[in-house]
Amino acid sequence: MSRLVSENRNALLTLIRFDIALGFGDRTIEEICFDNQVDTDTFLAIIRLLSDPDCKHCQPETKISVPTLIRYLRNSHAYFLNERMPAMREKLLKVLDKREVGLNQAVTNYFDKFVAAIRKHMLYENNEVFPQLNNVNVTEKYAHVFSKQHSQIELYLTEFKNILIKYYPVQSSFSMHRFLFDICNCEQELIFHNAVEDELFLPAIA
């Protein structure tokens, strides 16, 4: 496991979303997953997908554990809603130029609109989708909704990033550049999250 984490930074957030603590010594992936009640095949399927998202349709046939995947997704939702988005908003307020009062209000309003879309989608999954997995035809019912909401969220973030790049009149500012770099990382995290739902979760509940 230590080699996997050292060579693949995406594995770090995957560990957190399975409640797997660091400090696992030389134990293997199988041993760590067993100790943390995580299905090994599902864990590795996520790692493969996040390591090579362009090959997401090339995943080998893997028996996915739906309970394990739901655990991952619920923790991922908690990460975005309780950690990532509040921290991003705090950083945003710090890098805005106080002289641009009207523009700042428009920027923060757009960011809040983006976060509201994320919250609505993730709570919908937590409260509506996951509890109904024993129902038939659940994949057909939710696949279109997932696709539409994922596209909307990614569009919001892309537009927000472009607003800052194209229209926010900031002088040479390392703080704003660092924030934009963080936005790009957040954008990639959301793309990864959506890929797990689209490429692993929906097929698993079909």
Image (cartoon, rainbow, N blue to C red):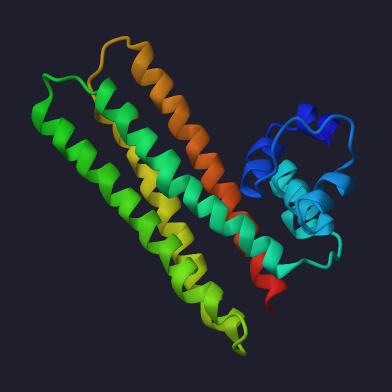
Quadrant housing the C terminus? bottom right
Residue in view at x 83 percent, y 53 percent: 34
**Residue projecting furthest to the top:** 172
Give the side of residue 41 with respect to residue 73, left or right. right
Residue in view at x 88 percent, y 46 percent: 31
Judge whether 100 appears above or below 201 on screen. above
Residue 130 seen in the figure: yes
Judge whether 33 appears above or below 94 on screen. below
Which residue is more in the foreground, 137 or 18? 18
Quadrant housing the N terminus? top right
Give the side of residue 163 with respect to residue 22, left or right. left
Asked which quadrant contains residue 24, the reply is top right
Which residue is more in the foreground, 116 or 82? 82
Residue in view at x 25 percent, y 28 percent: 93
- Count of numbered tags: 0
Q: Where's residue 5, x and y in %?
A: 76, 32
Which residue is more in the foreground, 17 or 187? 17
**Residue projecting furthest to the bottom:** 136
**Residue projecting furthest to the front:** 35
Residue in view at x 82 percent, y 31 percent: 2
Which residue is more in the foreground, 186 or 33? 33
Q: Where's residue 198, x and y in %?
A: 62, 63
Judge whether 112 appears above or below 138 on screen. above
Residue 199 seen in the figure: no
Q: Where's residue 155, x and y in %?
A: 41, 51
Q: Where's residue 13, x and y in %?
A: 63, 40
